[in-house]
Amino acid sequence: MPIFVILIVFSLVFYLFYKTKYFRSKLPAEKRWLSAKSSIALGSFVGLFGINQLFLYQTTVTYIIAGIFIVLGAINVRAGIKAYKYFLPLAAEEVRETQK
């Protein structure tokens, strides 16, 4: 499915983008916030890769491995969203304090 390939590439690009911003940031709360965003992108990459494998091959081993990838991706996305929600106000406050 070409749509999954496009989404996989986009999620990988977003992961690399947020990791680059993470390494360039100096503020600790902002670093954690960017790390959460990159975790969401990486989780979506892994999950979408697992879904894509379901369409490419129809063997029992593929179903097991794809299921593991989908579950790990979903766990990573969920943890990233929780961290994003937690660190967003902290990062915003940190940026406001540094601009003063």
Image (tube, helix red, strand yellow):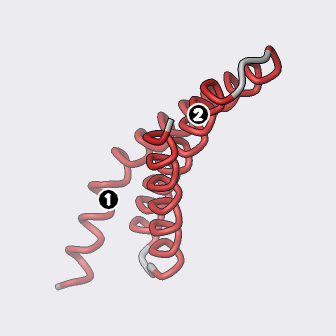
Across and down, in percent, residue 62 comes to 76, 24
How packed mark 1 is, by other alpha carbons closer than 10 Å (few <14, some 14-19, many 20 or more), is: some
Across and down, in percent, residue 22 comes to 49, 71
Given residues 97 and 6, the one toward you in this image is: 6
What residue is disc 1 on? Answer: 90
Across and down, in percent, residue 7 comes to 44, 46
* Helix, strand or loop status at disc 1: helix
The amino acid beneath tag 2 is Asn
What is the tally of numbered marks visible in this picture? 2
**In-image side of 65 versus 84 (left or right):** right
**In-image side of 71 versus 57 (left or right):** left
The amino acid beneath tag 1 is Leu
Q: Which mark is residue 52?
A: 2
56 lies above or below 81: above
Foreground tag (1 vs 2): 2
Q: What residue is shown at x 46% (from left), y 68% (from top)?
A: 31
Q: What residue is shown at x 55% (from left), y 50% (from top)?
A: 42
Q: What residue is shown at x 27% (from left), y 55% (from top)?
A: 89
Residue found farthest to the top: 60
Given residues 24 and 93, the one toward you in this image is: 24
Q: What residue is shown at x 53% (from left), y 77% (from top)?
A: 23
First in sequence: mark 1 vs mark 2: 2
Residue found farthest to the right: 61
Q: Residue 70 carries which label?
A: none
50 lies above or below 39: above
